[in-house]
Image (cartoon, rainbow, N blue to C red):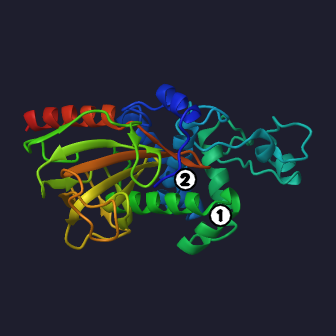
C-alpha cells in the first residue's frame, strides 16, 4: 500500500486537490502547448511526447507542493534562478545566454530574442530539451538524462509512462473520466476514506468502498497506464493505474482480471480491467471474508512521496459527467 501523510498532507490536499485539479484551461492552451512541443522537437529531435510528459509532470507537482510556485504560464517546467543562471552567478536574474553558459547555467535562448528568460515559455522548454540533448534523443539516453536531473527512479518511470500515453493517443486532451462501474449497475457507496481498519494492524482506510454484486465489471476511470497488477494480502487481486496528472488509481478486492490485462498496458476511460469481488485479507486466493465490493483509492505523487486522499468527490463528479455525456448522444 502506498505511503501517505495523515495530517499535514490532508490539510494540503483539502486546499489544493479538487475534482478539477490539474485540468488545462481549455483547447487553446492545449494547442499552444502542442505547438511549442512540436517546434522544439523539430529543433532538437527530442520527441514531443517526452517534452509533454516532462512539462505535465512538473505542472502536476507544482500544483501540490508549497515549496514551488504555482504554474501560471503555458509551460509548467520550473527552474530555480540559480539552476537557470548558474549556481555561482552573482546575478540570479541573468538573461545573457553567454554569461549564463559561462556560469554553467541551464538557461538558453529558445525564441531567438537574444535573451534566456525564465518568463519565456519557449526559452524554458528549449532549455530543458537542450539539457536532454546532451545525453541523446533515444529513449534510453533520455531516461539517463532524466535520472541525472531528478535523481529519482519513480519520477523517471512516471515521465516515461506519460510519454508512452501521449505518444499512443497523439494528443494532450486526456482529461475525460468515467465512474469505475457501469452506471446502470446496482451499486452503492459513501465516503469511507480515513475510517479505522484493524485487520493486519491499526491503519486507516485509504479509499472508498463501492458495494456491488460479485462480478460486476470494473472499468478504468481515466487515460493512463497499468503500473501494477497482482495480489496483495490486504487488497487481494488488485490493479494500479497512473494517469497523466500524477494520480495513482487503486482498484482492489477484484474477483479477477480482464483477459490479457498486463503491466505497461495503456488504458482509457471505460477499459475493462476486472470484476467486483471479495478477495484479500490473506494469502493468494483468499476470498469471501467480506461482502463483494470495489475498494477504489487515489494517491498523489509530489516528486518525493505519495499519499492517499478521499476519492469520493471525484467519483461523484465523474458519475455526473458520464451521465451528461450519455444524454448528449
Crowding at mark 2 (Cα within 10 Å: few <14, some 14-19, many 20+): many
- Decide if residue 147 is in sight here: yes
Side (left or right) of 243 relative to 329? right
The structure residue drawn at horizontal position 18% and vertical position 44%, both measured from the top left corner, is: 211
Identify the element where label 2 is drawn.
Answer: helix
The structure residue drawn at horizontal position 53% and vertical position 50%, both measured from the top left corner, is: 3
Side (left or right) of 201 relative to 266? right
Side (left or right) of 292 relative to 112? left
The structure residue drawn at horizontal position 21% and vertical position 34%, both measured from the top left corner, is: 321
Q: Which residue is the site of mark 1? A: 147
The structure residue drawn at horizontal position 57% and vertical position 45%, both measured from the top left corner, is: 302
Identify the element where label 1 is drawn.
Answer: helix
> Which badge, 1 or 2, is on the more N-terminal residue?
2
Quarter of the rendering occupied by the N terminus: bottom left
Q: Which residue is nearer to you in this view: 74 or 162? A: 162
Q: Which residue is the site of mark 2? A: 54
The x and y percentages for residue 35 are 46, 47
**Can you tell which quarter of the image residue 191 is in?**
top left
Crowding at mark 1 (Cα within 10 Å: few <14, some 14-19, many 20+): some
Quarter of the rendering occupied by the C terminus: top left
Q: Which residue is nearer to you in this view: 197 or 219? A: 197
Q: Which residue is nearer to you in this view: 32 or 247? A: 247
Query: Marks 2 and 1: in contact by CB < 8 Å?
Result: no
Q: Nearer the viewer, mark 1 or mark 2?
A: 1
Side (left or right) of 185 relative to 19? left
CA separation, marks 1 and 2? 12 Å
The x and y percentages for residue 227 are 41, 63
The x and y percentages for residue 11 are 53, 28
The x and y percentages for residue 15 are 50, 25
Disc assigned to residue 129: none
Extreme top residue here?
15
- Decide if residue 111 is in sight here: no
Amino acid at each position: 500500500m502506498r505511503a501517505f501523510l495523515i495530517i499535514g498532507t490532508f490539510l494540503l490536499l483539502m486546499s489544493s486537490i479538487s475534482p478539477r485539479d490539474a485540468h488545462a484551461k481549455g483547447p487553446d492552451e492545449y494547442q499552444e502547448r502542442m505547438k511549442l512541443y512540436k517546434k522544439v522537437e523539430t529543433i532538437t529531435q527530442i520527441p514531443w511526447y517526452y517534452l509533454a510528459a516532462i512539462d505535465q509532470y512538473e505542472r502536476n507537482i507544482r500544483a501540490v507542493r508549497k515549496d514551488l510556485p504555482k504554474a501560471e504560464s503555458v509551460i509548467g517546467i520550473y527552474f530555480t534562478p540559480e539552476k537557470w543562471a548558474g549556481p555561482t552567478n552573482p546575478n540570479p536574474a541573468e538573461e545573457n545566454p553567454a554569461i549564463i553558459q559561462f556560469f554553467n547555467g541551464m538557461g538558453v535562448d529558445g525564441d531567438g530574442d537574444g535573451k534566456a528568460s525564465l518568463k519565456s515559455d519557449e526559452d524554458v522548454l528549449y532549455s530543458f530539451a537542450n539539457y536532454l540533448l546532451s545525453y541523446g534523443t533515444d529513449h534510453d539516453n533520455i531516461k539517463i538524462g532524466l535520472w541525472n536531473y531528478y535523481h529519482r527512479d519513480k519520477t523517471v518511470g512516471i515521465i516515461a509512462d506519460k510519454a508512452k500515453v501521449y505518444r499512443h493517443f497523439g494528443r494532450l486532451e486526456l482529461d475525460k473520466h468515467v465512474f469505475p462501474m457501469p452506471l446502470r449497475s446496482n451499486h452503492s457507496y459513501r465516503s469511507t476514506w480515513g475510517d479505522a481498519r484493524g485487520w493486519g494492524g491499526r491503519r486507516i482506510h485509504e479509499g472508498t468502498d463501492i458495494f456491488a454484486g460479485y462480478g460486476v465489471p470494473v472499468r478504468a476511470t481515466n487515460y493512463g497506464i497499468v503500473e501494477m497488477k497482482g495480489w496483495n494480502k490486504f487488497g487481494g487481486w488488485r490493479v494500479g493505474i497512473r494517469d497523466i496528472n500524477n494520480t495513482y488509481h487503486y482498484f482492489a478486492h477484484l474477483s479477477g482480471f480482464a483477459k490479457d490485462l498486463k503491466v505497461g498496458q495503456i488504458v482509457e476511460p471505460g477499459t475493462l480491467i476486472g470484476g467486483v469481488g471479495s478477495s484479500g485479507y490473506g494469502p493468494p486466493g483468499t476470498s469471501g471474508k467480506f461482502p463483494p465490493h470495489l475498494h477504489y483509492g487515489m494517491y498523489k505523487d509530489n516528486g518525493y512521496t505519495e499519499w492517499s486522499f478521499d476519492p469520493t468527490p471525484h467519483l461523484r463528479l465523474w458519475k455526473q459527467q458520464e451521465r451528461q455525456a450519455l444524454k448528449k448522444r
